[in-house]
Image (tube, coloured by chain):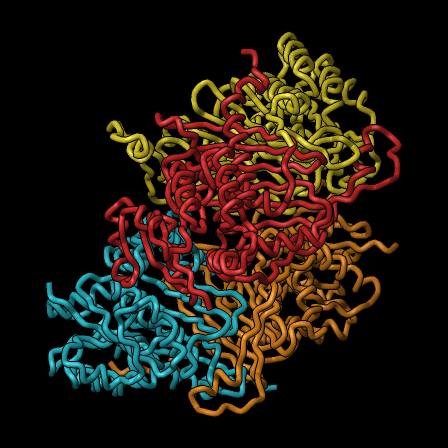
Chain colours: A orange, B cyan, C red, D yellow
Amino acid sequence: MRQIAVGIVGYGYWGPNFVRNFNEIDNVEMKYICDLQPANLERHRSRYKSVIFNSDYNELIEDKDLDAIVIATPVDTHFSLAKQALLAGKHVLLSKPMCRSSAQCEELIAIAAEKELVLMVDHTFVYHGPVRLIKQMIDTGELGDLLYLSSTRINLGIFQHDVNVVWDLGAHDFSLLDYLIGRAPKSLQAIGKSHTDTRIEDVAFMTMEFEDDFIAHFHVSWLSPVKIREMMIGGTRKMLMFDDHRPIEKVRIYDKGIELLSKPPETETARYKALVQYRHGEMKAPVYDMTEALKYETLHFVDCIINKKVPLTDGHSGLRVVRLLEIAEQSIKKQSLSSVTLER
Amino acid sequence: MRQIAVGIVGYGYWGPNFVRNFNEIDNVEMKYICDLQPANLERHRSRYKSVIFNSDYNELIEDKDLDAIVIATPVDTHFSLAKQALLAGKHVLLSKPMCRSSAQCEELIAIAAEKELVLMVDHTFVYHGPVRLIKQMIDTGELGDLLYLSSTRINLGIFQHDVNVVWDLGAHDFSLLDYLIGRAPKSLQAIGKSHTDTRIEDVAFMTMEFEDDFIAHFHVSWLSPVKIREMMIGGTRKMLMFDDHRPIEKVRIYDKGIELLSKPPETETARYKALVQYRHGEMKAPVYDMTEALKYETLHFVDCIINKKVPLTDGHSGLRVVRLLEIAEQSIKKQSLSSVTLER
Amino acid sequence: MRQIAVGIVGYGYWGPNFVRNFNEIDNVEMKYICDLQPANLERHRSRYKSVIFNSDYNELIEDKDLDAIVIATPVDTHFSLAKQALLAGKHVLLSKPMCRSSAQCEELIAIAAEKELVLMVDHTFVYHGPVRLIKQMIDTGELGDLLYLSSTRINLGIFQHDVNVVWDLGAHDFSLLDYLIGRAPKSLQAIGKSHTDTRIEDVAFMTMEFEDDFIAHFHVSWLSPVKIREMMIGGTRKMLMFDDHRPIEKVRIYDKGIELLSKPPETETARYKALVQYRHGEMKAPVYDMTEALKYETLHFVDCIINKKVPLTDGHSGLRVVRLLEIAEQSIKKQSLSSVTLER
Amino acid sequence: MRQIAVGIVGYGYWGPNFVRNFNEIDNVEMKYICDLQPANLERHRSRYKSVIFNSDYNELIEDKDLDAIVIATPVDTHFSLAKQALLAGKHVLLSKPMCRSSAQCEELIAIAAEKELVLMVDHTFVYHGPVRLIKQMIDTGELGDLLYLSSTRINLGIFQHDVNVVWDLGAHDFSLLDYLIGRAPKSLQAIGKSHTDTRIEDVAFMTMEFEDDFIAHFHVSWLSPVKIREMMIGGTRKMLMFDDHRPIEKVRIYDKGIELLSKPPETETARYKALVQYRHGEMKAPVYDMTEALKYETLHFVDCIINKKVPLTDGHSGLRVVRLLEIAEQSIKKQSLSSVTLER
């Protein structure tokens, strides 16, 4: 079996998870761990004795035997690091969000296409057992027509310091939306607020409308005293709650819904009652694959390299997510113009 | 002690709770239960043997010995019923929302003022033990400067059929905001969606911005498979979660927060890290008054009548809430204009 | 339809719930509320204007038109009050536990049989929607062969002062066991402890063994800071958790279990692994009847009187529960003899 | 700094956690991973490239440069493996329970004492942040006099196959009791049941009585559909719930309790009411050290070796736990004799 040599640049919060997973794959040689911070490099030297720890990215770029580079650095550096890697003929796995702009994403996609390299984005949740179960439920019609998606992704504090809460937490939500719903919204409204002198937004509320009556809403925050990871999806047949912070039974499916009646209402006041009824049935929490998402993701990356496949979360999905992030950012900037102003 | 004779009009979902509470007050004679639906009138005849059950509101208006009328009918009828009552010299307790328009609220306020009658609005939560505790924490500065308020009030189905989910569930939130925060927003943005042929919105997301960095957000829905009643309030010193659906420990206070540092950051990338730090302390669930809110509210109404006091939830607070509801409704209508439209 | 006149003796903590329910039944005349405490009598005079409030039990006994008496007094008075009622030809509904001794129970059963009167015991939970659902699951074999029942019924403080925690809380558990399992244990061991000078046990742990491998365990306490009402029942096919303190989804059914393999183990150490495997499947929370248990119970009592039926919770079920309570009490007294004493 | 060479025997379920932690300690050389199962040895070869993986325990015993041996094998092998190690002059860290009998424990203690070697038992929970917090609360009197300890440690399935559920899960509870309470019970009663042909008990209930009114109870099971790790401790001043399965706020402290009144009761029936009152105050969830328990434990083992200290969980604590396990096992065997047998 062909051996794939992998190097990683960025060994802070998330990088070690990549390394742990790649290191467990038989036909992967985890070759480099590269980081500018000496402290980060010191952490696991004894754990990975055969890995080269360095702070010079050029060493990776110039190593002819290195097949792939994983980029787990702050987003502002993604484009430059990925471009160098692709131009040097390396396959690339980029942390989310893919780049700081859609133009950058498009340029990387073009280079990768021309050089026939794998360009994959780390939309981790797409490889998460509960999410794949939900995707299946949507695709098979078990939920019926989708009515809404509402997500709350809030906690106290941040892990990255270079972007606002939308680019940090919202990127997860938008990648889930992209995977699960597979449609672009017709409009997006976002309101965000910074509560510090940094002027970096720490709380944001975003609403997307679609061509039909489907609506999606996202609440992201770094200022919540409790960590919440909840996503609710309502359909005409069933509704579900995905609570990723629970240790077990992360997905609960409710046989509950709304039923439209065809009988015309006799009086105006009885109109609503006549047309709409609610159905209350059982709840169930199905079994799902509990394997770590990153395990599937890293295996998939290696499989795409060896077998020349297109990744499930390729550059185009990365681009779609970055476009939504850009629009949300724009909307936050212009939103004061659009809201109803109150007379005082 | 002076005896107050009380009649109620509207004996559907909420009316019986008023009657049960007024009936327990010593110096109240619960005199009339009036409703147009014969079935509603039949329900508790045997329970309240000395009460007059009727379907003719005029009988209440014309009864010279009746001191006060409680109005628990659909909101579209509030103005007309309340106006008749006030003009006939009756004190009035109106269910929320007070009226269908702010102009109607203003007219009722004017009549009540001229005739020196008590005009009170049933903003029940203002009399709720946990809410009064939260009010006290805000007023004494225990939470510090307020950063945000975020509320989720969702369930499956509705209790009233004549208004949308904003007028139904949002009215509770806006009355809580009015009581707890005591300031009007400088802007309000709302997005709502109807998923039925009735075109009555069943899901809505509303965001209010204020003069300072405080932001408030409300998620209301009749389409949620689970009932959620959660309000989070974050301050610079402490943060709290009010979960009204829990049987106990409804208020949890987190000694968690954000700390701004004054040291200037050395590099741009370290800016956020240098300026902001998070504090993680203990959580506590304080003791609060567990008395039914409606008990205090009905006692307060009687006290206002006897002692010529201004109710805590007077016509002006009812008006302020209705103004916010009107603006939310306006915003829902115009919002498609204001959002960022995506190129496809 | 025949009208049934009902009187109640004992109007403290639980009595008002009986009255509220009997009062809602069409063909019941709620005639007397009798209690020795004047304060108890004052509470709902205005709510039930046509009921006679008195403190003289003889008035009920001597009223020829009174059909039935509900006894909701401390357990020490049950026998005497019930005997008088039965001898006077009244049907009787007795609070749990039925009497202070099995001999007393037997005497009441004999009198009721001779006089052809309904003698019913208030084992409320037997009429509770979730419990009836569980009974059905057991009877239809959905759980498979039963392996264990484990119950935790604990809270802070008590409602009755004349018996220990076993007679108070344990009576509920034993009536549930009697109804759901329908078999008597072959042995019962109980350990109880009083932490006050009253020497009344406030904490107890009880274990019952049965002819087969089924085992039942009960933890009851007045000294728990949290209120817990949990019962777990494990079967070979499925297992369930009944959490009566949750507002919804009180019953959760787990498609989990144990599978015995027939293949003989090769080595002694591998014996367990070879013979036993665990099955992990989905969880579901079924729909159940949410009607108040006491509504069914009071309707059933009236139905038994009118149609000469034997109540589901008749004197014999009351007797079986009292027998278990007696044995538990005996076991608590003698248990120091039976335990392994540690050398020090 | 002196370098300590460590070898481990047993690399199944728990062993890898030891290795991961020892590997992170600067002055530890993780030298051997020894296991009889080839599959276990293959798992982490690539992760720990400098460690010697072997299946020959003698190699460890005979290596003069090896300072310490960690034993993470099935309990039946503990005594023999530990004795060889101690006789060869190695310090020993033994998984719980220490040995299969107290006689074996005593022999190991004697050898270690004679040869001045560290003999430590892996009572992991003693090093757990929440447990150390609870210990402090007990020792400082914050809980008042202790009334009871009640523990539920149940789940579906097992990790070890050579002992019953008492030796598996109960060992954790007994080590917690030993650490937190620090007293031996005066008696212990246990009832256990096997539901398989293996006749190995899979469910057990154990109750311990102490010289005063303190009582401890343990429910352990491999047959529960849900995983529960709850321990409640009640004192005269405060009560606490330790829920180790929650991701956060594992310890909740209730300012609730019981108050004994000195006023003599006037009547017998009012006796209880007169003497006992309940206090209902706030709940709080304090901050505790969230470091992995095994990190502290492995550091402590190394510290004891280098600085010739007595471990917190030394051979004597291991022995005390094994004694309780032996007594529980005895009690299960003889319990049918001691319980009250019911006439049928």
For the image, the number of numbered tags is: 0
Whole-percent x and y of residue D25? Answer: 61, 32
Based on the displayed image, in which of its 4 quarters is residue D162 positioned? top right
Q: Residue placed at 40% from the left, 82% from the top?
A: B163
Q: Observer-nearest residue: D298 or A306?
A: D298
Residue B161 is left or right of residue A314, and the answer is left
Can residue B185 be spotted in the picture?
yes
Q: Residue placed at 70% from the left, 58% from the top?
A: A288
Q: Quadrant of the C terminus of chain A?
A: bottom left
Q: Residue placed at 55% from the left, 41% from the top?
A: C174
Relative to C296, does residue C315 appear above or below in the rendering? above
Q: Observer-nearest residue: A330 or D196?
A: D196
Q: Observer-nearest residue: A39 or B337?
A: B337
Whole-percent x and y of residue D334? Answer: 66, 21
Residue A68 is left or right of residue C314, and the answer is right
Q: Residue placed at 17% from the left, 79% from the top?
A: B90
Residue B260 is left or right of residue C312, and the answer is left
Based on the displayed image, in which of its 4 quarters is residue A289 positioned? bottom right
Relative to D73, does residue B340 appear above or below in the rendering? below
Q: Quadrant of the N terminus of chain A?
A: bottom right
Based on the displayed image, in which of its 4 quarters is residue D121 positioned? top right
Can residue D302 be spotted in the picture?
no
Whole-percent x and y of residue C231? Answer: 57, 45
Residue A15 is left or right of residue C90, and the answer is right
Whole-percent x and y of residue B239? Answer: 37, 55
Relative to A109, does residue C299 appear above or below in the rendering? above
Relative to A184, does residue A10 appear above or below in the rendering? above
Q: Observer-nearest residue: B202 or D147?
A: D147
